[in-house]
Image (spheres, grey):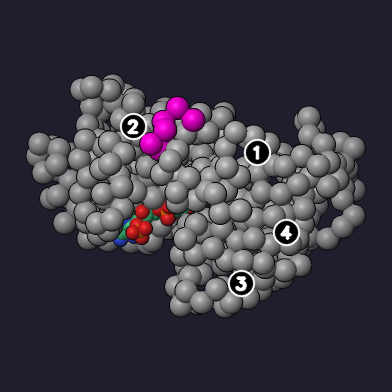
Amino acid sequence: MKPCPYGTHRVLFPLGALPQAAQKLDNGLPLRDNELLIEVDTLNVDSASFTQIRQACGDDRGRMADMIVQIVAERGKLQNPVTGSGGILVGRVSQKGSGFPGDVQPGDQVATLVSLSLTPLKLEEVLAVHLETDQVDVRGHAILFESGIFARLPQDLDRRLALAALDVAGAPAQIHQLVKPGDSVLVLGASGKSGVLCCMQARLDAGERGRVVGVCYDQAEAEELRALNACHEVIIADARQPMSVYHLATQANAGQKFDLCVNVVNVPDTEMAAILPVKDSGCVYFFSMATSFAKAALGAEGIGSPARMLIGNGYTPGHADFTLSLLRRHEGLRALFLSRYGGKD
Ligand code: NAP
């Protein structure tokens, strides 16, 4: 059988599903003609998934490693059974199928830009679990289908910093498409990885007449965000408390609702904190993988909000270059990313 561009030839169960929706993938060798084999160094686990695994294992690195190994053994991919999400990886190309497109060769260091939730993965060993960065060093291999996008790791940026930024590259790139000059923008989870990138990009696009308000969960991260000058105002609130967020956020916006709210929180039950503070003519952008479609749709109906709601697509054409160039242009942003995610090799 000819291998499928989208990788359905690797789906073991249920037959007919695409790899993301599949319960189990074939992660074995040999490589098919339209595939790329990668020796994996590090997984950047999606934040919603990593947080769920941390909580389930009580922050115990050994138990977390066992849980990750078990998920991959059961599914042939790292797809968290609770959040459904994955992450991305970096590694070195070790084999290229004759029909795999693109200018990539064995030995190249790459980051995958498609989710681990659809990428066949086989783990030999977990070497280290980094609680502070959501990254996991491993030995193993992954397989990319011909439809799977990837980026060569940049030479001028720290490997772990690039991995962290590429994981959320879709968010700032889409903010650039959504924010117009003069817009008011609210960012929930503003001091996280995608949060700071979104705040910075929103501030650039909203321009002098615009207003960007960031919602953080803890004081230290709020101070870091203030120092970056990415927001006009930073407030501290729990995004699971919609009325509290609504009052604090609108106060920070001269009593007005917002044109756009971006939800990049990594825990569940934050849908209404994103919808309530948005104008009827506004837009809510759910990038968070902990978002419930039912809670958002029924919750909006319940408060009579006709605001437009968007699912945060992980992919936007050119998103990897866009996000890396945002980091290159802003020294403070780059320094923050470096101190949090980089330089630990
Ligand atoms: P991150 O760096 O962990 O940031 C999440 C932020 O949310 C943190 O600053 C965290 O604060 C904050 N937060 C947690 N609980 C909160 C609460 N109750 N109220 C207010 N803020 C709270 O995560 P990330 O990597 O930027 O990812 C953000 C979201 O995007 C995650 O849900 C992730 O799964 C998702 N994601 C989506 C895609 C996609 O394709 N759509 C791709 C990648 C990631 P603390 O640090 O103080 O806890």
The residue labelled by disc 1 is 153
Residue 345 to residue 68: above or below: above
**Residue flagged by tag 3: what amino acid is it?**
Ala
Query: Helix, strand or loop at disc 3?
Result: helix
The residue labelled by disc 3 is 65
**Residue flagged by tag 4: what amino acid is it?**
Leu
Label 4 close to label 3 by CB (< 8 Å):
no
Query: Helix, strand or loop at disc 2?
Result: helix
Which quadrant of the render holds ligand 1?
Answer: bottom left
Write the start and end of the magenta stretch as one range: 328-333
User: Looking at the image, how many numbered discs can be counted on the residues?
Assistant: 4
User: Residue at position x 72%, y 59% from top?
Assistant: 121
Residue 101 is one of the magenta-drawn residues: no
The residue labelled by disc 4 is 121
Q: Nearer the viewer, mark 2 or mark 1?
A: 1
User: Residue at position x 77%, y 30% from top?
Assistant: 102
**Residue flagged by tag 1: what amino acid is it?**
Leu
Say whether disc 3 or disc 2 marks the residue closer to the N-terminus: 3
Percent coordinates x, y for residue 324 in the rendering = 52, 33
